[in-house]
Structure formats: C-alpha cells, structure tokens
Amino acid sequence: MIATKKVTFIELTDNCIAKLTVKRDRQEDPKYGDGVVVCGIIGILSDSGEIPKEIRFCSRVEILGEAFYTIWGIQAGEYREISAYFTAKTWKEAFVDAQVKLENEISKLVDVIEKRKQALIDAEK
C-alpha cells in the first residue's frame, strides 16, 4: 500500500529548518479526469510568524512561484507554508512527482544560502 503522507526535514541554517510534506488529497474532479491528487507543502520554521531574517532573500528567490519575503506563504502552526497540488494516474506517481518538485524548489533556497556563506568566506581573501 502506498503511504498517505510523507514528511522530510531539511536543515537550512543552524536556526532554520524546512519541512517538505506530501499527502494524499483526493481523486481528481470528474470533469477533468480520473487521476489522483496529492498536496505538496513546503514549510519554513517560523516561531515569530515571519521568515527568519538570515534567509529572507526576497525577490532573489521564488519558491513555488512566490518571492521569499518576510510573510511568504501562510502561517500554519510554527511554520510558514506554501502548497501546490500534483495529479497523476497513481498515488505512487503523484507522490514521486510532488517530492521531486518540492526538493527542486527548496534546493533554490539551499543554493542561495550556500552562495551567501561562500561570499562571506571569499570576502576574507
């Protein structure tokens, strides 16, 4: 049986964690087809209700089409979250598609964080 939910945590900085969640949502609306739909969610730990200052890259980074400003996404518990939906013929295919997309999206943020760290190291030369 295919899982109903998958959660992955990624450490972005010493104080910041991203949470990638993929979960079953529903069967596709019959007017569009017979596929299944999963919801993919990217969450950034945010106790204050804002994106942490050290990763607030604004228009330099877009995650799921939304620039990474102070109030990116919506507050959901202790995370700021944004979601997207993925449709496929099977749950397995939908889960894989969603997981790959979420990982690709969060890698944009990981890349700019690493570039910023490297820029500080290079500034010492």
Image (cartoon, rainbow, N blue to C red):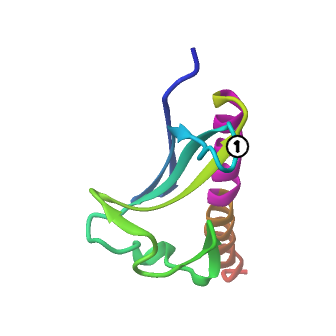
Above or below for 58 versus 52 = below
From which residue to which does the magenta span run? 92-106
Residue 95 shown in magenta: yes
Relative depth, front residue between 39 and 49: 39
Which residue does the image show at 59% across and 47% down from the upper left? 29
Residue 75 visible, this angle:
yes
Q: Say what amino acid the circle numbered 1 marks.
A: Gly
At 45% across and 57% down in the image, what residue appears? Answer: 43
Q: Nearer the viewer, residue 58 or 81?
A: 81
Measuring from the top left, give residue 73's x and y in whole percent: 44, 70
20 to 35, vertically: above or below: below
- Principal SS element in the magenta part? helix
**Residue 14 in view, yes or no:** no
Q: Which percent across, then down, holds residue 78?
A: 29, 57
Write the residue at 40% across / 72% down: 52
Q: Is residue 15 left or right of residue 10?
A: left
Considering the numbered disc 1 on the image, is that residue within a helix, a strand or a loop?
A: loop
